[in-house]
Image (cartoon, rainbow, N blue to C red):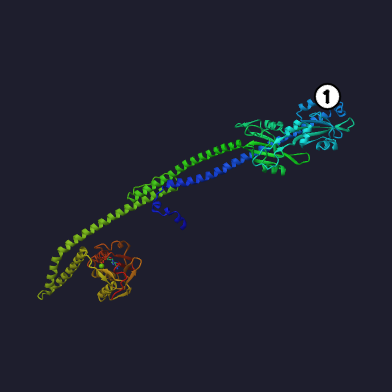
Amino acid sequence: MEISKRRLPWLKTPRFRELRVSLATRLTLSFLAVIIISSLIFTIVGVQIISHLIISEAEERVRNDLNAARYIYDNQIAYVQQAAEFTATRTFIEDILQGNLTASEKEEMIWFKANEGLDVLTITDSNGVVVLRTSNPGLKGDSQRNQVLVGAVLRTRTPASGTTIVPAEELSNESPILAERAFIELVNTPMAKPRPETQETTGMMLMAAVPILDDNGDLIGVVYAGKLLNRNYEIVDEVKRTVFQGVVYEGKDIGTATIFQDDVRISTNVLNSDGSRAIGTRIAQNVYEQVVVQGKQYIGRAYVVNDWYIAAYEPINNIDGSTIGILYVGILEQKYTDINNRASFIFLGITLAGVILSIFITLLISRNISTSISSLASAAKQLANGNLEAKAKKTSNDEIGELADTFNLMATALKDRDDKIKEFTKKKIMESERLALIGQLSANVAHDLNNPLQGIVTYSYLLLEDESSKPEAKDNLQKIVVQANRCRDIIRGLLDFSRQKKPDKTLCNVNNLLQACISLVEKQAQFQNIKVTINLDENLPMVILDPSQVERVFLNLIINAAEAMDGNGQLTLSTQLNHENNSVEIKVQDTGHGISEENMDKIFDPFFTTKETGHGVGLGLAISFGIVKEHNGNISVESTLGKGSIFTVSFPLTKVATGIENGS
Ligand SMILES: Nc1ncnc2c1ncn2[C@@H]1O[C@H](COP(=O)(O)OP(=O)(O)O)[C@@H](O)[C@H]1O
Ligand SMILES: [Mg+2]
């Protein structure tokens, strides 16, 4: 990981990271990578398979062609044998053996030899001594006993035929022309096996020897016939004609055939670059090793004289079974290379067309996907900018379509919620306007009433203290004083509520404030039968607040609790640090009558009271709520009807106060 990053430092550069590649491009590129890689593999494998198929097809064909060539070759041997057999049964054969041959019969023999295309047609007596040599009538009386085929016939009295190597001397005995034909200058051939000789003087001959029998079936002589293969193109040209039908490919014979004597071309239609037959050139060493040394077929590519061929070679054996030459056929590789190239091109073309089609489809798909996503993104952007009417267009019936549906559902839900919030806020604003109006009104009324009321209180006191007043009047005056004081309380409450004084904040210990409040009310008659329990958190941090305002809140809650319990019950006061909200919490819990569900929402409203006239004004909680909010705090209530209520006040810890230990 480290190394690769170091090697590719541009990966870390901000420009690369910020590079924005669209989804469509990325999709297209990844698809493209897959398509190109797979078609590359497909093409390589495909082309390979095609060329393999073509090569094996060509090899199969050349193998068959070699069989055909072998058939033609063997036929030639059979033909030579037939000619010898025919001669052995001629009527004047006994004349020949007895040396009584007429000139015309001799003519006939010479004509027959030439007509049959034979190079040798010789008759010996029963000891193998030559009596007539048609190719060289002047020479006779020599023994041919040691010649393989003649020897075999003398021994077995049955015909023998095959391919043999004839020494130069023998050849010139048969005819000087033959020796001349057999003489071949070896041509230096690349890749051939090194050879010390520079010329070949022996000849390779198709030969047959047959017995001449008298009427009793006794052997009276031998006829042997032969065709010298050196520079005799009958066989190879027939192969070219019948097997390859003389087809020419780009100015060259498509198929060629050759007869090798050992490793030398002695009969061939493979041409040198000057157009002459490549007589005297030699076979590649590796082919020679396989065919002559190991006696096996060779099928495969071979460089023949000056072209590549798909070639087949097989050994030519003499009658003893040892390899003396090679039969070859080959098809010009160029043709198969061209077929292969053409097939590969077509294949490549198809693949390319496929790739282009795939790219087109890929572009279409990724464009489709990216438009769907773009539509979603633009709708989301509109939504983020506050247009809750924004809707995503559903363009497909897949996961993205589903996403668009979900998005639209979400947008609708958001709009509903927004509408509700707007309505709620509107209500709240109206409410607070109403409250403000009430406050204003109360303040005016209270202010205007305060002065005359002050007069009533003062003067009724004066009258009450006047000794001269009648006792009945004093009674009424007493009532006036009480009612007037009540009016004054109401007015004070109204003034407090409406004035909304800014708190005068200082660092305070909430525990101490609570303690002060409880000691203020404890002694009162109302609390005589109330059991007060105080659980204060010793380590409560100090909080910045207005002590007198907060004291009023605590007093209101404590007095409400006592009133709810009708002076009889359990009052629990506690403080604690709420770590979650990072605030100080004060709880006032009573075992009073509790608050009904329907009143729960109203208790903080100004002038809401459940108490009978003369006992409650309904401003205590409203004022307390205002004070707590002014301190950024919170006031909440939990209540069970008939069991009691818990009022919880919380003040946030300010940074200054946090961590300050509970002071004295
Ligand atoms: N501790 C409590 N238990 C039950 N009801 C309560 C408690 N505190 C307040 N209330 C209800 O809330 C109403 C409003 O209280 P408050 O604003 O203090 O006005 P007042 O005490 O003058 O009625 C009370 O009339 C009462 O019904
Ligand atoms: Mg009250």
Identified at 24% across, 62% down, the residue is 606
Question: In the rendered picture of this protein, how many numbered marks are placed on residues?
Answer: 1
In the image, ligand 1 is in what quadrant? bottom left
Q: Position of residue 103 (x, y in %)?
A: 83, 23
Q: Is residue 593 visible?
A: no
- Compared across the picture, whether 557 is left or right of 69 comes to left
Amino acid type shown at disc 1: Glu
Q: Position of residue 613 (x, y in %)?
A: 23, 66
Identified at 72% across, 44% down, the residue is 293
Q: Position of residue 540 (x, y in %)?
A: 32, 72
Q: In this rendering, is residue 356 above or below 569?
A: above
Hey, which quadrant is residue 161 in on the image?
top right
Q: Residue furthest toward the top? A: 104
Q: Position of residue 481 (x, y in %)?
A: 16, 70
Secondary structure under the numbered disc 1 in the rendered image:
helix
Quadrant (top left, top right, bottom left, bottom right) of the C terminus: bottom left
Hey, which quadrant is residue 486 in on the image?
bottom left
Pick the front one: 232 or 474: 232
Q: Is residue 418 visible?
A: yes
Q: Residue furthest toward the left? A: 468
Pick the front one: 138 or 386: 138
Identified at 84% across, 36% down, the residue is 145
Q: Which residue is mark 1?
A: 105
Label 1: few (<14), some (14–19) or many (≥20) C-alpha neighbours in 10 Å: some
Pick the front one: 184 or 57: 184
Cβ of mark 1 under 8 A from ligand 1: no
